[in-house]
Amino acid sequence: MKKGFIVAIDGPVAAGKGTIAPVLSEKLNGSYLYTGAMYRCLALLCIEKKIDVKNKEEVKNLLKEIGIRLNGKKVFLNGKDVSERIKERDVARAVPFVALIPEVREEMVNRQRKTAGEMIEDGQAVAPEVYDVGRSLRSGPLIVAEGRDVGTTIFPNAELKVFLTASLEIRAKRRLKQLHEAGFTGLSLNKILKDVKRRDEQDSERKIDPLPSDPKALGYFVIDNSGLSEEATLNAIINEIKKRDLINDNS
């Protein structure tokens, strides 16, 4: 294996990013970076402080007091473990609104790059500009970074950019299963279908860092995992990593 590289995993809601990315990082002995957690933490803080997520000025003011720490699958908001809380529906509904604010995105991208730098340098953050040009990781560990703009804005020169997708119905079924497992009952597939479709529209139509309409043109390795198991999806990514000579065949 080369000394360090980034695998950036992007895609629409419920395409499997949150399932595949941490498992991939474990298989390759890498670090897992969930970039979307930062937006979810801000959305949760708005909810807790009863701030309207459509009030841009009040949301921006929260940036001064929000502390976010990512440790693998664990997410901490101002010192409190919110790993499960940020997955809930009220947070999911609020996220697109805070993510639309340019100042929020700028701040979060800087924090995400800084977090990656700390992973690489063992506490010594690398300047964000390094990731704009993209080749700092040769002396650091593997990072599997997951998020909706991770391969276009945060790490545009990642050694491998993966775009996971699946049909709307498959993604809605996955999302419904996630919610049921989290203890939410009484939800219909039709309702979740509408929620997922709305999220797709919000992500695709936003002016800042929209979801790519043609990810292949942006250098993504695209996987439609509608009919694939988790293992098959992981194998497809690992095989692509090997094809690019980023790890050895016996890794």
Image (cartoon, grey):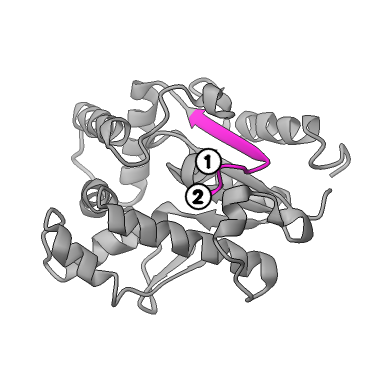
Q: Nearer the viewer, residue 88 or 97?
A: 97
Asked whether the beta carbons under mark 2 and mark 1 sit within 8 Å of each other, the answer is yes
Closest to the observer, 96 or 30? 96
The reply, left or right, for residue 162 in relation to residue 182 is: right
| Residue at mark 2 | 154
Amino acid identity at mark 2: Ile
The picture places residue 176, in percent across and down from the top left corner, at 31, 37
Magenta span contains residue 163: yes
| Image coords of residue 1 (percent x, y) | 84, 48
159 displayed left or right of 147? right
Residue at (29%, 70%) from the top-left corner? 63
Which residue: 70% across, 56% down?
Answer: 136
Residue designated by label 1: 151
Q: Identify which amino acid the numbered label 1 is placed on.
A: Gly
Circle number at residue 168: none
| Start-end of magenta stretch | 155-164
Q: Is residue 173 visible?
A: yes
Q: Is residue 41 magenta?
A: no
Compared with 6, 175 (above or below) is above
Q: Quadrant of residue 53?
A: bottom left
Say which residue appears at 19% left-offset and 31% top-offset.
191
Total count of labels: 2
Gap in angstroms between the C-alphas marked 2 and 1: 6 Å
